[in-house]
Amino acid sequence: MNDLDVLSVDNCDVYIRDHHILTDVSFRTLRGTITALVGHNGAGKSTLMKAIIGSQEKSAGRISVAGIDQDDQFSFYKPQFSYIPEEPLLMSELTVYQHFQLYQKSYNIPDDSFKQRVDQYTEAFELTDKLDEYPESLSKGMRQKAQTICALLPEVPLLLIDEPFMGLDVYAGAYLERLLADRKNDGTSILLTTHQLDKVRELADEFVMLKEGAVSSSGAVEQFHELDRRHT
Amino acid sequence: MESSTRSVYRWVRRERARKKRNLYKQVFSLNFDWTLAFYLAIYTGVMLLIMFEWLQDFIPMFESWQTTSASWLWLLPFAVLIRACSQSFFHPGICFTSSELKLSVLPHSRNRLFWLMVAERGLVHCTVAFTASSLLGIITPFSLLFLLKVAALYTLFFLLTLLIHWKMYSVSRRKKLLTILVIFAVVGFSRYLILLAGWSGFAMGFALCMVLTGINFYLLPRALHHVDWAKVVGANDAKVWNIRLISQVTRIEIKPPKRYGILQTYLRSRRAKQRFTNIYSLYHRLWRNHLQSQFKYIGTTIVTCIVILTVLPGQVEWMLLITTPIALFIYIEVAASLFEEQFHQEPILRLLPIEEKGWRTTYIKWAATGVSLLVITFFITSWLLAGLNIGLFIQIIGLVYLAVHELLGQIRERMYKVQRINYRKNELLQLAGYTVLGLGVYFAPFMLAIFLLPWIGKYKSF
């Protein structure tokens, strides 16, 4: 592992019941880069994301973020990343603002930074008038915006994003793009999955292609041409 | 088209049953043990024989119970009606899932599907009621005729309340509560009619039957009007697929829909929307919601603990020295499981770094409430059995001390588990704690040894 490595996935295998979903997956993401995780439907992208965040048990291999191993120091591992899932994971008991407060406490964000970021992001994502609403009274896009803000509140070495532009309107999508570029310039490593190949070419510096649960190719995004078909 | 709807519906049901069967098989293959099953079968057979012999000695008692039950049989229709109304808070009674709803988008009538399901449910209930009563008639000293009469009465009123249950599921909670109150008032008035006006139980049952038949006639053409379909299919999908064991073994997660009861209505009030000035209030909110969703489980545990602390020692006094540690152990294990469950149940909490201290301290306040119930029960039982004395106060102090010590320890261990931190459980010390508690209940000065346990745990690893 070198100093620039943020996420390090080594020889990961994942089984779900009897199905071998991920086979010997290894790759790294570097500081200040955006890596796109691409692949056909069912290639294992979401399973890999789940394995990285620790909600999917792996049967072999090691994963570490900023040098902290998932298996050995899980409680220190979790604060090293934040995650934007494809489907918002908001709790129906809490309003949008109360979700931000939960993230603040969980990631130990100082009050002044928290307030400044909440103001900045809610204004940019046009969510200022929805802060005291419960998730079910929001549209799907609004929920996605709330979830995105939650994940952007902490400053962490690794940002994981599953389909970042899904459900966002064009303005929010454009703002998120700028924000990701800023975070990248500040040294954050970003791993995202997307089916929008033009976005991969626009945003990403590196790519990792999964095919049937294994890494089929990886490298600089300039080398990325097209998605491998499921059966070739 | 009508027969086609039936065949498509039956095919969907068959495929659903097949999928569930496969899931059960997986669970079964993981948990089945032939040796254990063999011994269990022999044990069950012997127990049934013993019970049969034993029940013969109680024939006169059963006859007296039967006579008493017969005189109260007029209450059964009201009980079935109240059951239907109270169940309508939780599920709609007819298992109309999202699959049936999707079928109704295809060229299959929703009305036809609904009545197929009503007929199926009625038939299943009728078969179960009569089979169960026949079996009870054979193996217990109750007369078969009496039990068949109960089954017939139950089935009749079950069928008459099925549609009411279905319709009530989609009405507001206020209306449901009001209906239940009206039924209770009618029961009270009926009792008055029986006692003072000399009406017979049969007349009461018959009058209710007529009223319910009238309501059913009114509801029949309106069965599918003003139905909250999203709520109906949400509750039914959860009921059909959210089988705890299966979801755990197969790791298929289907979260049951949130129930918004009286407490949640309060939680969703304007005050609840206010931003937290103290993060612990947020944790308390989440614990309160979590515990409310597990209310049935918590209620069963507390009632079990209170029963074993009162009923058994009430029969044999010295049993208290065994039942006290058992009750405390059960409560603390359940409390610790509920703590851990929160972090597995909520997807967002699995994702977030956990702020350990806040989560632990807020939960302990909730768990301590249950401990206080056990302590009060222990105090009352001991007081009734042995009177008030200095020994009882030593026992109370020891019990509270061990309960708090164990609770803190167990919660800490569960947090380690959630955080995937390796730890070494000191089971011997835990066992010693419960043993000393039992000895302390027998002879109060022994209880003082409990205060040494944390000190021993600190300096001595077993």
Image (cartoon, coloured by chain):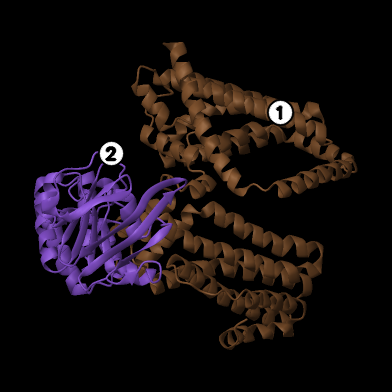
Residue A199: x, y in percent? Answer: 12, 48
Dot in front, 2 or 1:
2
**Which numbered disc covers residue B48?**
none
Residue at (43, 55) in percent of width and height: B345
Which residue was labeled with disc 2? A230
Towards the viewer: A78 or A167: A78
Chain colored brown:
B
The residue tagged 1 is: B131
**Which image quarter is the N terminus of chain A in?**
bottom left
Task: Count residues near mark 2 (Cα–Cα under 10 Å), then give few for <14, some for 14-19, many for 20+.
Answer: few
Q: Distance between the residues labelled 2 and 1?
A: 54 Å
Residue drawn at x 50%, y 60% as measured from the top left: B338
Q: Where is residue B173 in the image (x, y as percent from the top left)?
A: 43, 41
Q: How crowded is mark 1: few (under 14 residues within 10 Å), some or many (20 or more)?
A: some
Have a look at marks 2 and 1 and say if they share a chain. no
Above or below, B96 against A12 in this view is above
Answer with the quarter of the image where residue B461 lies. Answer: bottom right
Question: Camera-side residue: A67 or A164?
Answer: A67
Q: How many labels does the image show?
A: 2
Chain that appears purple: A
Residue type indicated by callout 1: Thr
